[in-house]
Image (cartoon, helix red, strand yellow):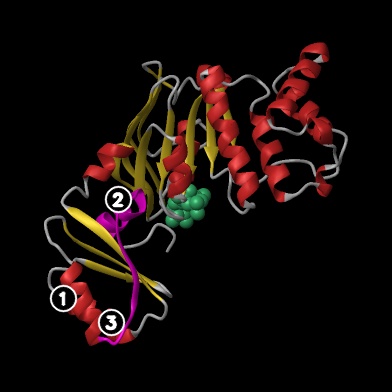
Amino acid sequence: MIELVDLTKKFKQNEAVKNLNMFIEKGEIVGLLGPNGAGKSTAISMMSSLVEPTGGDVRFNNESILKKPAPLRKIVGMVPQEIALYDDLTAEENMQFFGRIYRLTGSALKRKTDEVLDQIGLSERRKQVVSKFSGGMKRRLNIGVAMLHDPELLIMDEPAVGIDPQSRNYILETVKRLNEERQMTVLYTSHYMEEVEFLCDRIYIMDQGNLIASGTKEEIKQILSAEKTISIKTHRLNERFIALLQETPTINRVIAGEKEVTITVPKEINMFPKLIHLAEEAELELSSVDIKNPTLEDVFLHLTGRALRD
Ligand SMILES: Nc1ncnc2c1ncn2[C@@H]1O[C@H](COP(=O)(O)OP(=O)(O)OP(=O)(O)O)[C@@H](O)[C@H]1O
């Protein structure tokens, strides 16, 4: 459906996106994961022809959109990162205002407004002004506005940022339902790996303008197939124990939390006896030692040495 070929954007000295290659097939939910500043917003702005690339191409059904963006614009719904709504209008009035921009009028506009308000669970609140809405309700309406013209491809820029977990789940479930019931193709950008893990069939991971991994969840996790992650919990972690872990040559990585420390070791190594020995030496009581399946967060850490939300 859509393909990015060596897509590049330079802002003066800053190369925000470097030779990005990506594709999205019809009916997929594709995740674009990366920390703040990775270049996700710039990439999707170029993909939806809002920002002009400094290099490369965006192809829609095998034709470049750089000179002819109209066919793509017709089928794209863009959910921006910032809420773009009129605070002093009601939910319904916002829908009608944006619907007219998409050239919807009369009974078609009314039908679409009813349908979308229902899809985003705001039918009951249609007469309420947006300034009275919670952050989660505004986010839902922000998505609704992008769906008024029945887009085939919904591009979402961190649509669940800064809201409560219940609203976030509602948004994730809605996106999944739209994909399943209406075969809507979705590109979902986020810096939360849980969202991408829940929703997406295939994932691209960006960091500092570069694509650092891509594939299905399983394929990406295979990057860590030679390692395992062990989570060690205690009631009170001490500095001595962390230092001992860091000095142990068979441990590749140590990440300490308040009561939990996570280590990464080669798959074949049995760490249990060593951990018990180190805990004794640090005079520490272990409450649990669990081997975890690698997550996308672990992959990101492995590839960049940093956590996604650093
Ligand atoms: N209009 C602009 N002018 C100059 N630099 C920009 C502009 N837009 C983005 N950048 C820079 O490009 C880089 C990538 O930014 P971008 O917003 O695409 O990242 P992101 O992954 O979407 O992160 P975030 O989630 O914080 O938006 C950053 O270094 C940013 O400062």
**Where residue 293 is drawn, which disc sits there?**
2
Q: Which residue is mark 1?
A: 248
Q: Indicate yes or no whether the magenta region holds residue 297.
A: yes
Residue 167 coordinates in the image, percent (x, y): 65, 45
Instruction: Identify the secondary structure beneath mark 1.
Output: loop
Magenta residues?
282-305
**Residue type at the position of mark 1:** Thr
Q: Is residue 270 above or below residue 81?
A: below
Q: Which residue is mark 3?
A: 241
Q: Is mark 2 within 8 Å of ligand 1?
A: no
On the rendered image, what quadrant is the N terminus found in? top left
| Disc 3 residue crowd, few under 14, some 14–19, many 20+, Cα 10 Å | some
Q: Is residue 304 above or below residue 287?
A: above
**Residue type at the position of mark 2:** Asn
N-term mark: 2 or 1: 1
Residue 292 visible in the current orientation? yes
**Residue type at the position of mark 3:** Phe
Instruction: Identify the secondary structure beneath mark 2.
Output: loop
N-term mark: 3 or 1: 3
In this rendering, the count of numbered labels is: 3
Q: Is mark 1 within 8 Å of ligand 1?
A: no
The residue lying at 56 percent from left, 26 percent from top is 177
The residue lying at 19 percent from left, 66 percent from top is 252
In this orientation, which residue lies closer to the viewer: 266 or 84? 266
